[in-house]
Image (cartoon, rainbow, N blue to C red):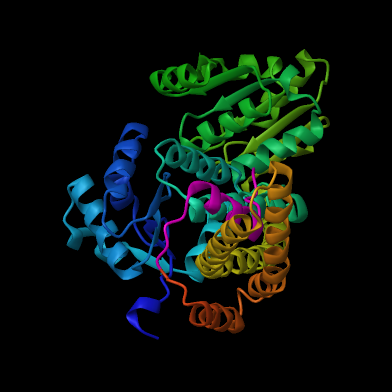
Amino acid sequence: MGDKEKEVMMEIVVVGFNHRTAPVEVRERFSFTQNGLEDGLSKLSEKKNVEECLILSTCNRVEVYAVSEKAEESIEEIKEFLSEFHRVPSEYFSTYLYTLIGNAAVGHLFRVASSLDSMVVGEPQILGQVKQAYKSATIKQAVGLVLNRLFHHAFFVAKKVRAETGIGSQGVSISYVAVELARRIFDDLSKRAVMIIGAGDMAELAARHLISAGIKNLLIASRNLESARTLAEILNGKPVLFEEVYYLLKDVDIVITATGSADFIIRPQHMREALKLRNNEPMFMIDIAVPRDIDPRVEEIPNVYLYDIDDLKNVLDENLKTRRESAEKAEEIVLQGEKNFLRWLDGLKVVPTIIQLKKRFEEIKTDEFGKAVSRLGSLSEREKSIVENMAEGIIGKILHNPLTNLKKESSSSLGALYAHTLKKLFELEVEVEVTEDEDLTVKQRMGKIEHD
């Protein structure tokens, strides 16, 4: 095949790093603010070998998705862009980067959107982040036919994974499990009072989960009152003195402890006094500290439900097992989605041939119609319309089977053979200018773009 007939292949590429390949001190240097993202998309779009592009920037990953006729050249341009935009020498981050081309790039996006590539498999935030990245790229007109189709397909696959596997239905953090156990004892958490004892990361995470579950009455106690005040301000809670804990036990339904104390801070006598003052109303206690903050003998007291970190870990292990089983099914859905998208992408290879062939027959029809009208002499507009419709009908019937078979075999080796044969037989040019209407018509026939 000569240069004139050489097929131009559009490839999808991914360049980036994530929580597995790069430490946080590297990832944070390449994160994009919203303004930075818009500026970055503009600069990236100017690169010679980048036809379409999108930037996904989260706390766990920074990835550039692009479409190019020259994949290797576009990858180098993306690396240059990352270096120039963030003013970081390429040698500093090159060892952390991964590059994916074609099928591997498609499968990677589907796994990212479905939360199979997340630090916590099944977490729900990533799909929203991918959608926001796509929205930003759309507003900047950085995406085109291929990335539009690719990302809408990714959204579809991710929703299918959520609906059919339940991958995100089981909590996979100690703090999340603690709150889920609280739900089992108190159906409506919004009416319950909670006291968090401790102001560290674990305590904050537990408090955030409780707030998400509807808790409004939140007390935060710490030996360092300033720490309690800071966390209470962030979470809209109320700081209390550590010495007030024993007095306030009677007023709360849930207690979560996460201090660094070397000895128990809550003992059986504290709980018996609190229960007496609250008329034996049930209390739920979660001790996520190591060493433990709550004397294990507290569990023997009626109407007190005490869980320590080992109890939570047992629930967590069961949840992780469920997620692993769900992930296996999710991988099958992702693989099928990848195959469907690649079939569509392969179909684009024959689009130029379809357009060229239709143009050639349209030229023949126009020429022969003009000759016929000239020979027939004076014809009414109705008679001209009949003749033109007849010519279009004949051409439509002639082209129907060839184009149907060409589309059907577009993703197989026969598709390339058919396209090449048609070009030879009808002396079609490879390079054609396609009007917007023609382009849309072909895209619609090759398969309507799915919408979210």
Q: Is residue 440 magenta?
A: yes
In the picture, measured across the screen, residue 108 lies left or right of residue 266, that is left
312 or 57, which is in the foreground? 57
Image coordinates for residue 75, horizontal then vertical, percent: 31, 64
Q: For the point 51% across and 45% down, which residue is it? A: 130
In the picture, measured across the screen, residue 52 lies left or right of residue 365, that is left
Name the image quarter holding residue 247.
top right
| Residue 11 visible in the current orientation | yes
384 or 7, which is in the foreground? 384
The quarter of the rendered structure image containing the C terminus is top right
Q: Is residue 212 above or below residue 83?
A: above
**Furthest residue in direction front, as rendered:** 377
Image coordinates for residue 284, horizontal then vertical, percent: 73, 31
Residue segment shown in magenta: 431-452
Q: How many marks?
A: 0
16 or 227, which is in the foreground? 16
Q: For the point 61% across and 80% down, which residue is it? A: 412
In the picture, measured across the screen, residue 145 lies left or right of residue 272, that is left
Image coordinates for residue 32, horizontal then vertical, percent: 33, 40
451 or 431, which is in the foreground? 431
Image coordinates for residue 313, horizontal then vertical, percent: 65, 52
Q: For the point 78% across and 24% down, which residue is it? A: 188
Q: Is residue 46 above or below residue 217?
A: below
Q: Is residue 6 above or below residue 179?
A: below
Q: Is residue 61 magenta?
A: no
The quarter of the rendered structure image containing the N terminus is bottom left
Name the image quarter holding residue 164.
bottom right
Q: Is residue 399 above or below residue 376?
A: below
Name the image quarter holding residue 268.
top right
| Residue 114 visible in the current orientation | no
In the picture, measured across the screen, residue 72 lies left or right of residue 280, that is left
